[in-house]
Image (cartoon, rainbow, N blue to C red):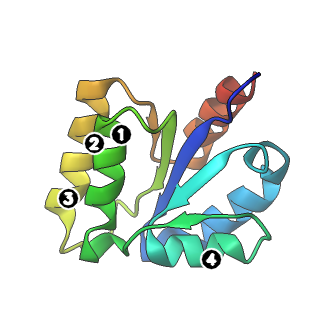
Amino acid sequence: MMTKKRIALIAHDGKKAEMVAFVKDHRHILAEMEITATGTTGGYVEQTGLNVNKKLSGPKGGDAQIAAMAAEGLLDGILFFRDPLGKHPHEPDVQMLMRICDVHNVPIATNPATASLILEALAS
């Protein structure tokens, strides 16, 4: 029996609409996965009809919770739509998340093009 792939979704405020559009475009793939998301992003993603395990919002520790999942081997990939032009008070958490992904070899996409490639690879 095949187990579901586990994916985490995160989006900075300026990228939440882009994340929702991406999720709608890739709903057929994401519907077959276990989805975890930071709190606010997860609320938006739930509006697409998908089930989401929501963590805290990013600035309140959600990025760190998802990093811990990656470190524990509980994620197959992370889609993190970052706003490279915005200022983010929780930037150290963002850097920590990316470092954890590198240390534990967890694929992380920071834009829709790479996110599509990761989803397609996980779905095959």
Residue nearest the observer in this picture, 30 or 69: 69
Element class at badge 2? helix
Label number found at residue 82: none
Disc 2 to disc 1, C-alpha distance: 10 Å
Badge 3 vs badge 4, beta-carbon distance below 8 Å: no
- Residue holding disc 3: 93
Label 1, residues with CA under 10 Å away: few <14, some 14-19, many ≥20: many
> Which residue: 67% across, 67% down?
20
Disc 3 to disc 1, C-alpha distance: 14 Å
Disc 3 to disc 4, C-alpha distance: 21 Å
- Residue holding disc 4: 44
Label 2, residues with CA under 10 Å away: few <14, some 14-19, many ≥20: many
Q: Earlier in the sequence, mark 3 or mark 2?
A: 3
Q: Earlier in the sequence, mark 1 or mark 4?
A: 4
Asked whether, in this view, residue 96 is left or right of residue 70, the answer is left
Label number found at residue 70: 1
Label number found at residue 98: 2
Disc 3 to disc 2, C-alpha distance: 9 Å
Q: Earlier in the sequence, mark 3 or mark 1?
A: 1
> Which residue: 57% across, 41% down?
6
Disc 1 to disc 4, C-alpha distance: 22 Å
User: Mark 2 is on which residue type?
Assistant: Met
